[in-house]
Amino acid sequence: MKKKTKTIKVDYLARVEGEGGLFIKIKDDAVVDVKLKIFEPPRFFEGFLRGRDFKEAPDITARICGICPVAYQMSAVHAMENAFGVKVEGPLRELRRLLYCGEWIESHTLHIYMLHAPDFLGYQDAIQMAKDHKGVVERGLKLKKAGNEIVSLLGGREIHPINVRVGGFYKVFEKQDFEPLKETLKWARDAALETVRWAAQMPFPEFEQDYEFVALRHAEEYPFNEGRLVSNKGLDISNSEYEEHFQESHVEHSNALHSVLKERGAYFCGPMARYNLNFDRLSKLSQEAALQTGLGKECRNPFKSIIIRSIEVLYACDEALRIIESYEKPERPYIEVEPKVATGYSCTEAPRGILYHQYSLDEQGKILDAKIVPPTSQNQKTIEDDLRKFVPQYIELSQEKLTWQCEQAIRNYDPCISCATHFLKLNIERT
Amino acid sequence: MPREDKPKVAVWKFASCDGCQLSLLDCEDEFLALTQEIEIANFPEASRAVIEGPYDLSIVEGSITTPHDAERIQKVRQSSKFLITIGACATAGGIQALRNFKDVNEFISIVYATPAYIDTLRTSTPISEHVKVDFELRGCPIDKMQLIEVISAFLKGRKPNTPAHSTCIECKRRGTVCVMVAQGQMCLGPVTHAGCGALCPTYNRGCYGCFGPKETPNTSSLSSWLKKQGTENEQIVRAFRGINAYAEPFLKESELHEKENKNHKG
């Protein structure tokens, strides 16, 4: 009997950041090939970071991603401080959390309302969606703006903020400067609560997998900048042990390296991993909102990541308000840092998951070597695995519907392909 | 009322961080109003829907770094009545143009284990080196209100109002104390194109040139002032060799000091 072959092909994935495509080959109802193709051109950041001054790293690495520049700045400054043996505490540390809150709100809301929701509601984009759900889209835009207002004030501007430096900030604010943000954030917290409820009633395909979730875990807080790297399958390491446990490999169909756990292979990072590993660290309000939707403390259906992103937006609004209310202006905007020969490591929680930076420095603080592993390259393999399992379950759908569902399965991860492409791999293997 | 025959606008991405096109979605207050006036005919970051060209206006982000993209930009130009470039990548090659100063093969092997899979050009170049560009909007990132101004201007057939004077002038207008004169900080404000509103000096730091060179910048004069303040040659090279390293006035200035540096050391 002749074998029936079918292919699902998307040349240019929409509503993701950066340039990627999808190719799936099916033979007799079995998936024989899945490729998340990444053709975003490489930009070689790790190459030209060599020879630059350590103080330049936050501004240079921010340019890796226009959607999550704060994450790059945070991982960069923490890695440098780790190298030079400096710890930023007190109000400066709180301000860094506040800046991250702004980025999570802005980036998650963009994804929830403009990139992901149209899939569930059957629209090509948020513009079409706005024709039938104007109030909803307007709420999303206003909520996104609230996040951007934090980043603009504290960082100077929404994209590629200019106020972050190794040791702290260039400028810090008086308590009353944050006053106008308070009203905005109180509104945003209510809007985030509505977002959680709205997201929870989307139609979700049945799809649960036994993932290994990897996220930071901190003794007291829901993680932004600090914590140990943990998983639900026994990983528990410090940031400096990253290289011993994770490995990147270069595959032909992707300009982004695939990252795997050396011992167990593919893993999952991002909001769903953070939620599963840190539910007990969420604020009371966010925990209650989550449980009210019936989500439970654990979730293994990546299509439901839209609910979890909404819960994280709620948490970020709540946390931002807490920080603003308890803020006292620090005496100095930054602490002095003395360069020395050292290697520094840091992992922080970008909106899309753990972002690893590692720098080797000389006695003047010149960068000798840089390694950066963004969240999307870490999720690439899991995304492909999802598709491999998802397609046979829904093989009866029409070609058009199945293609759309596959795109949606990719968008579950909010992939940032611009991020994923430009780095990675430090160990030089010459051919 | 929405317009019946809305002009078709397309957004294209080349090598970039996506930040400049994100500026369009960051126009939270204006975005829905804007979509009443224009038809977003191709904007993959925001929509699955693709409407065939020709387009009334193409907005191009990113630089040319691969043979494939060098061909793709030609097709974009052919299908566009007007083509404007947004951001440092599209107007000057961007930060990835730092590869232009080194051997790119060395970079590939630093980043990738199997260099044979990577297809890339030796240089990162601005869009204007490949096709005719009707207008260039500067910035890393661009200013979103300037983007709205440029789109409006093109759709109304007038010249965009985006001053080409220096960041230094913006700073004086804001009444910010000069960080170079008063604090001895290195600042590229006197030679950098306006557009950000002199952000960095208001945050107690010198300008680092996100918006690229202003019209007729006197880079050598700035360098000699920097030297008088005790700035090392190497620091001057790095300052000009940043986000707009391949923009001609900055390129020349950095090369000059790199040579001096080598002669001095040699």
Image (spheres, coloured by chain):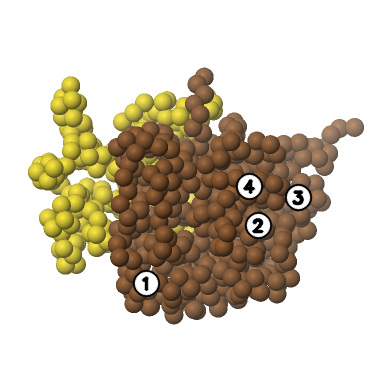
Label 3–label 4 contact, CB within 8 A:
no
Residue identified by numbered label 2: A277
Marks 3 and 4, how far apart at CA: 19 Å
Residue A106: horizontal and vertical position, in percent? 48, 64
Q: Which mark is residue A328?
A: 1
Q: Amino acid at mark 1?
A: Glu
Residue identified by numbered label 3: A210
Q: Which mark is residue B262?
A: none
- Secondary structure category for the residue under label 4: strand
Marks 1 and 4, how far apart at CA: 34 Å
Marks 1 and 3, how far apart at CA: 45 Å
As drawn, which residue projects farthest toward the top?
Answer: A431
- The lab-note entry on whether marks 3 and 4 share a chain reads yes
Provide the chain ID for the residue under circle 1. A
Marks 4 and 2, how far apart at CA: 12 Å
Q: Amino acid at mark 3?
A: Asp
